[in-house]
Amino acid sequence: MTSPRIKAVIPAAGLGTRFLPATKAMPKEMLPVVDKPAIQYVVEEAVGAGIDDILIILGRNKNNISNHFDSVPELENTLRGKGDHEKLARVQASTELADIHFVRQGEPKGLGHAVLRAKNHVGDATFAVLLGDDLIDERDPLLTTMIAENARTGLTVIALMEVDPEHIHLYGVAEVEPTDNPDVVRVKGLVEKPKREDAPSNYAVIGRYVLTPQVFDILARTAPGKGGEIQLTDALQELAVTDGVLGVVFHGRRYDTGDKVDYIKAIVQLASDREDLGPALRPWLQEFAAQL
Ligand code: UTP
């Protein structure tokens, strides 16, 4: 099936307070995961799903992110002069990935507010949102399935993952109904960060969305919700009871790099799987684990 070309939006304007002081002068999306900033993996994922137009929503410390996706002639000339083509290719990779645009959020008034900043760039079209601190392992496809599901039904599609009830209060949580496809559910309602006893299910919303442009009108009139922020979850709740929302259930590897423990797990997992680093790291990891 051929899916329509869509744009991607990557919100990266949060304060990242859980990572202070590392995020005092640097967005959390720029924290390195092995040797690339988290947001580069996210951009690569969008490109891997066939998207070539990406809008990044910037907050304070905006230059860090835009510089990363820009060329650095001085560094590139030095590497070229040294004949170090391998490092040169690594430097240039982030510049050549896609057509990357930027817009400021101004004030971090919530994820819903950040997404609304994409309205002019996206226009009246379906688009994907990928959270800049949420990594989906490239070996476990998700976005392509979501885009195909949207193309099939015309509906908004969100990504869901079953989480331990102990952690459910950290997420937006969906009330769901099964469909004919075991990996796709109909979302009947959504609640942002409920108490464990109030959670309608164990299906947590994770950072991938394929949104229809109706979401912009809803966000424009969505009042601040949980935490005083304009919540994307609240707008999706409205869409769930009007147009309809589907959830693709993800069973693969996902790392929330905005959380310290998950961030460390991402680095260990990705490094130990890599051909250039794994052979040196894995024996040490085994030895280390044996001592625990
Ligand atoms: P989080 O709630 O995880 O980000 O937002 P945060 O507020 O920066 O994190 P902590 O809790 O203070 O550590 C999820 C995503 O939405 C973006 C963030 O950058 C992140 O990618 N976001 C959040 C915005 O772009 N703008 C906002 O106003 C809020």
Image (cartoon, rainbow, N blue to C red):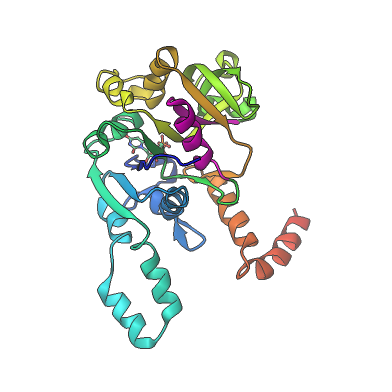
- Give the image location of residue 29, x and y in percent: 40, 49
- In the image, residue 195 lies in the stretch drawn in magenta: no
Q: Is residue 194 above or below residue 51?
A: above
* Foreground residue among 278 and 175: 175
- In the image, residue 156 lies in the stretch drawn in magenta: yes
Asked which quadrant contains residue 83, the reply is bottom left
Q: Taking the image as four quarters, which one is ligand 1 found in?
A: top left
Q: Is residue 188 above or below residue 85?
A: above
The residue positioned 48% from the left and 30% from the top of the image is 152
The residue furthest bottom is 82
* Foreground residue among 26 and 83: 83
Q: Is residue 142 above or below residue 93?
A: above
* Foreground residue among 272 and 240: 240
Asked which quadrant contains residue 87, the reply is bottom left
- Give the image location of residue 96, x and y in percent: 35, 63
Asked which quadrant contains residue 118, the reply is top left
- Give the image location of residue 159, x and y in percent: 52, 32
Give the extent of the magenta segment. 141-161
The residue positioned 56% from the left and 45% from the top of the image is 141
Left or right: 153 in relation to 281: left
Quick check: can you spot residue 289?
A: yes
The residue positioned 55% from the left and 45% from the top of the image is 255
The residue positioned 41% from the left and 23% from the top of the image is 233
Q: Is residue 96 above or below residue 147?
A: below
* Foreground residue among 123 and 262: 123
